Image (spheres, rainbow, N blue to C red):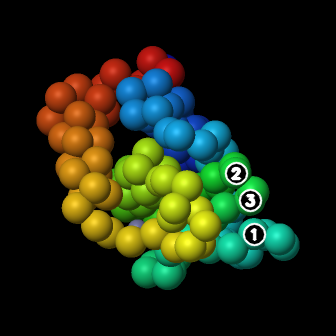
Amino acid sequence: MIARSNRERVLQISRWLADKFPTPFPVTVRCPKKIAAIPGSGPLETKIGDYGTIIQHGHKIIINIAIRPGRSRSMIVDALLHEWAHAATIRHANLEKNRLNHDDEWALMYGKIYRSFMDDGGCKESEDY
Ligand SMILES: [Zn+2]
């Protein structure tokens, strides 16, 4: 099914990602208009832009992808792939330190996700999720 809204598309790709790139901790994807901190949780990485963020809530991971009118779908999708690469490579040690970075492990996972989505049919395949 072709996603009509950016929010639908983000949730659709999230289901595809969960299937293809499982995460060690459960991930919830939310699509707020603006990214705001949730009480009792901390950001896991320094905010670079205001497109996406990943936060920890106990052993649950929450990815926020900001959806606003006029925002390009490709930037939104890229933010999701970026944050998902964090979620897929997160380890207990990172959770304890309460921070993530763009290390080799993250970069390798981001590359795998990106190629799978952009070059190996994931973009199309995810439309069935
Ligand atoms: Zn990041």
Earlier residue among tags 3 and 1 = 1
Q: Which residue is mark 2?
A: 59
Tell me how far mark 3 sits from mark 1, CA to CA.
5 Å
Using the image, determine if residue 42 lies above or below residue 21. Answer: below
Earlier residue among tags 2 and 1 = 1
Residue 96 location, x and y as percent? 61, 67
Tell me how far mark 2 sits from mark 1, CA to CA.
11 Å
Q: Quadrant of residue 20?
A: top left
Using the image, determine if residue 39 lies above or below residue 11. Answer: below
At label 3, which amino acid type do we have? His
Q: Which residue is mark 1?
A: 41
Dot 3, crowdedness within 10 Å: few (<14), some or many (≥20)? some
Tell me how far mark 3 sits from mark 2, CA to CA.
6 Å
At label 1, which amino acid type do we have? Ser
Secondary structure found at label 1: loop
On the picture, is 129 further left or further right than 64? left
Confirm or deny contact between disc 2 and disc 1 (CB under 8 A). no
At label 2, which amino acid type do we have? His
Q: Which residue is mark 3?
A: 57
Secondary structure found at label 3: strand
Confirm or deny contact between disc 3 and disc 1 (CB under 8 A). yes
Residue 3 location, x and y as percent? 51, 33
Using the image, determine if residue 12 lies above or below residue 95. Answer: above
Q: Quadrant of residue 62?
A: bottom right
Residue 49 location, x and y as percent? 45, 79
Work out whether residue 84 can be spotted: no
Dot 1, crowdedness within 10 Å: few (<14), some or many (≥20)? some
Secondary structure found at label 2: loop
